[in-house]
Image (tube, grey):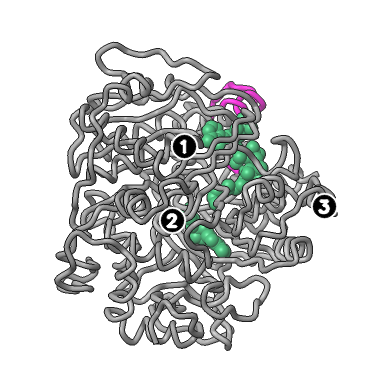
Amino acid sequence: MRNGDTAGYEQTYARSLDDPEGFWEEAAEAVHWGQRWVKVLDDRNPPFYRWFSGARLNTCYNCVDLHVEEGRRKQTAIIYDSPITGDVARITYGELLELVSRFAGVLRGLGVEKGDRVLIYMPMIPQALVAMLASARLGAVHSVVFGGFAASELATRLEDAEPKVVVTASCGIEPSGVIEYKPLVDRAFDLVSEKPQACVVYQRPQATATILPGRDHDWEELMRSAVPAGPVLVEATDPLYILYTSGTTGKPKGVVRDNGGHAVALKWSMKNIYNVGPGEVFWAASDVGWVVGHSYIVYAPLLVGAATVVFEGKPVGTPDPGVFWRVIQEHKVKALFTAPTAMRAIRREDPKGSHLQKYDVSGLRALFLAGERLDSDTFHWASDLLKRPVIDHWWQTETGWAICANCMGLDPLPVKAGSPTKPVPGYDARLLDSTGQPVPPPAEGLLAIRLPLPPGCLTTLWQNDEGFIDSYMREYPGFYVTGDGGYIDEDGYVFVMGRVDDVINVAGHRLSTGRMEEVISQHPDVAECAVVGIADGLKGHVPLGLVVVKLGSTTEPEQLVNEIRSLVRQQIGAVASFREVVLVHRLPKTRSGKILRSTIAKIADKRPFSIPSTIDDPSTLDEIQDVLAARAR
Ligand code: COA
Ligand code: AMP
């Protein structure tokens, strides 16, 4: 049996683990290579496994040129729909080829060559995809930064990735108004020691950015005079992009993805997980700044020759909770991928689904949800409303594609609410206890993946091999530790219960509580602080800050709380949704000085908790209980 055939999930899964090289070699036939591999899995230097070593390809060629050469020049590649501006545009594969070739020429003209970094800070407009693909075309390495991040977060990423060129737009548009990007970029340039050589600005009609002569360039002007550039072959193992994600410390981790394994895995996933193929419309309602955007707005749909929807809007308020159903009808979307938060937002405003009745969504085959735990209520609500499969799938920035899913292109399994089903072929998911021993059902443990990871997963952290090992591999040799806890039931279904570290998911956005603590501590009146994630009916989790004020501080409490809120907003960004701050006299700690964050979170969520035996002073919990109870009233 070949892995592309509609085989049973169980057989396919077993084969992927019994013969990973054979399995992925077959999948690799779907990709266009400039040179074939010498070794499918190069395992000479664990845990730095490399897929398709010796092979050469160009990812942009596979996403664009190949389809034009195969006769799909006139087929739609990108559908841009902005309920915020009222614009709808379609870009064919032929037009996309013209745009990316030209923009690759622009980048080359600014000195970008294979291996150089290009930082992209853009809203949800087609030019963001063009910039990413153009970078890939030259064999450069892009690093896209989510538009909701503040200047200092952008600066941290500039400092680490050391891009030659920054690509941005004059503004993003949020329901709250126009957000000018250029002042943020300028500020980030000021903050870094090694400045990028150039900045390309796409001017949108809603705001005009100031162009700094010598450094800044107008996108359209450069495009007019650019010499189109062809695809540059790179090693399969060369980096395609760096995507920074939140870790447990304040410093974001630069997840590195390769070219070859990425193309193979994503192409395989489109058929086998999402069951979407050439000419069909796939919509990932996320943002290019997140991993979902990288994989399923940009690369995967284009790798298979589908059309991808670039949606610049929100599930509600742009203009109403029917916008998702309108987009599905208007653009004939076959599969929608979004975060559970989006469904909760729609449900909150339209619990009976009356907006859905106005649209014909009969073409939609399935709804895929990821980014945070899918609660049973939302699962049942969406399933009952849409009357088609609602697929919970679990993955992370690091893996780049789903670890667990109900694979719609294989024969789908029965669903269990609360579970993203079983591991996807290629992933040997295990449950470990704190000593690294396997945990039998029904106990909870740490979710880990036995090495090697399948193609498409991170190959290292940017210029930080040691950090890669320390973060994911050191604790349990031979395994990749996901940072999520959960359990695996008797039928092999995986249940992901949440992070076991200091990472939280706010509206499907991954944030580090450690980073927020770092920022709050900068306030001169703050002696110490703790940030925990607490349950929120809409966003899944939101951060709550507990702050101990310095003795002698004369700032009024209300003012202090406001100053702390705006500090987080300025330094991390509005996306942190940091609003809840309480002032306390002491933080509960263990005798060794570790803040009891999970106990605080349980108290805030009114969940049962026990007083840890390691607590230094149990009376500290009394104040926390009082303060948090007062806050709830
Ligand atoms: N650029 C600038 N600012 C941005 C931004 C961007 N790209 N994205 C979000 N923000 C800002 C918002 O304007 C908001 O600012 P405010 O505090 O001034 O209102 C803040 O960041 C929080 O935004 P958001 O997380 O979108 O929350 P919201 O309360 O505005 O909307 C939802 C709530 C549920 C509608 C929204 O979170 C949503 O659509 N979630 C879908 C989840 C998703 O796409 N996840 C991606 C991973 S799959
Ligand atoms: P990110 O790296 O931003 O994609 O966030 C990854 C984290 O989101 C995971 O480690 C999980 O904690 C959480 N997550 C993603 N998908 C799911 C899911 N289907 N169920 C539960 N948690 C999820």
Mark 3 lies on a secondary structure that is helix
* Residue on which disc 1 sits: 126
Depth check, front residue: 78 or 173: 78
- In screen coordinates, is 529 left or right of 620? left
Question: In the image, which residues are magenta?
Answer: 544-563
Q: Position of residue 373 (x, y in %)?
A: 60, 62
Indicate whether 374 appears above or below 244: below
Between the residue at mark 1 and the residue at mark 2, the CA separation in whole angstroms equals 16 Å
Q: Earlier in the sequence, mark 2 or mark 3?
A: 2
Q: Is residue 546 magenta?
A: yes
Is residue 334 in view from this perspective? yes
Q: Earlier in the sequence, mark 3 or mark 1?
A: 1
Residue 357's disc is 3
Q: Position of residue 66 (x, y in %)?
A: 33, 54
Residue located 58% across and 78% down the image: 412
Residue 305's disc is 2
The amino acid type found where label 1 is placed reads Pro
Label 3, residues with CA under 10 Å away: few <14, some 14-19, many ≥20: few
Q: Position of residue 60 (x, y in %)?
A: 31, 49
Label 2, residues with CA under 10 Å away: few <14, some 14-19, many ≥20: many
Mark 1 lies on a secondary structure that is helix
Mark 2 lies on a secondary structure that is loop
Residue located 59% across and 59% down the image: 335
The amino acid type found where label 2 is placed reads Gly
The amino acid type found where label 3 is placed reads Gln
Residue 135's disc is none
